[in-house]
Amino acid sequence: EEPKSTAPSPVPPREAAMSVQASHLLIKYSGSRNPVSRRTGQSTSGVTEEAAVAELNQWAEKITSGQISFADAAMQRSDCGSFKAGGDLGPFGRGDMQKQFEDATYALQVGEMSGVVHSDSGFHLILRTA
């Protein structure tokens, strides 16, 4: 009789993604949880939801057309403090981010960019990097 293996069984691929990594470009607006840009220190209370979405869509077009890299776009425009790192948020797991952001990130393939995602912080473009 063969001896039973004590090696752990392989982890199914879906469960292997316990943590992900993403970069994002955040545009805050009047309805944001904290309507102040971390990049400029200025209030975003004068920015409407429609204006934020329209501007984010313009950035998405520039990124997808190759006019600018995601990281450069985030450095130039993101209202999150991660703008300094090209929007890189580092690795995170379930429960670490706001649910809307987390769900959108986990739904992306590595290297894929989201459409406009709304969270309590504002509107995001998300690039899953790992």
Image (spheres, grey):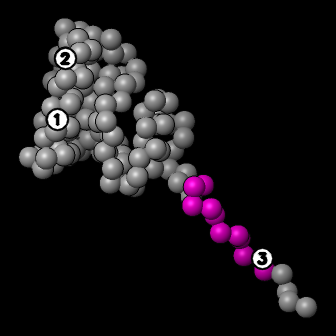
Task: Choose mark 3 or mark 2, whichever is in front.
Answer: 2
Does residue 116 appear anywhere in the picture?
A: yes
Magenta stretch: includes residue 7: yes
Residue carrying label 2? 51
Image quarter in which the N terminus is found: bottom right
**Precedes in sequence: disc 1 or disc 2:** 2
Residue, disc 3: 6
Q: Position of residue 29 (x, y in %)?
A: 26, 16
Q: Is residue 62 above or below residue 52?
A: below
| Element class at badge 2 | helix
Residue at 85% in and 86% down? 3
Measure how far apart labels 3 and 2 are at the Cα level: 58 Å
- Magenta stretch mostly in which secondary structure? loop
Give amino acid for label 1.
Answer: Trp
Dot 3 or dot 2: first in sequence order is: 3
Q: Depth check: 68 or 50 in front?
A: 50
Residue at 19% across, 8% down: 46
Do residues under tags 1 and 3 come within 8 Å of each other at their CB atoms?
Answer: no
Checking the image for residue 59, the label placed there is 1
Residue at 36 percent across and 30 percent down: it is 117
> Residue 86: which quarter of the image?
top left
Residue drawn at point x = 31 percent, y = 25 percent = 123
Q: Residue furthest left?
A: 67
Q: Nearer the viewer, residue 103 or 39?
A: 103
Nearer-N-terminus badge (1/3): 3
* Magenta highlight range: 5-15
Compared to residue 48, the image places residue 79 above or below, namely below
Q: Nearer the viewer, residue 86 or 102?
A: 102
Q: Quadrant of the C terminus?
A: bottom left
The three-letter code of the residue at mark 2 reads: Ala
**Type of the residue with mark 3:** Thr
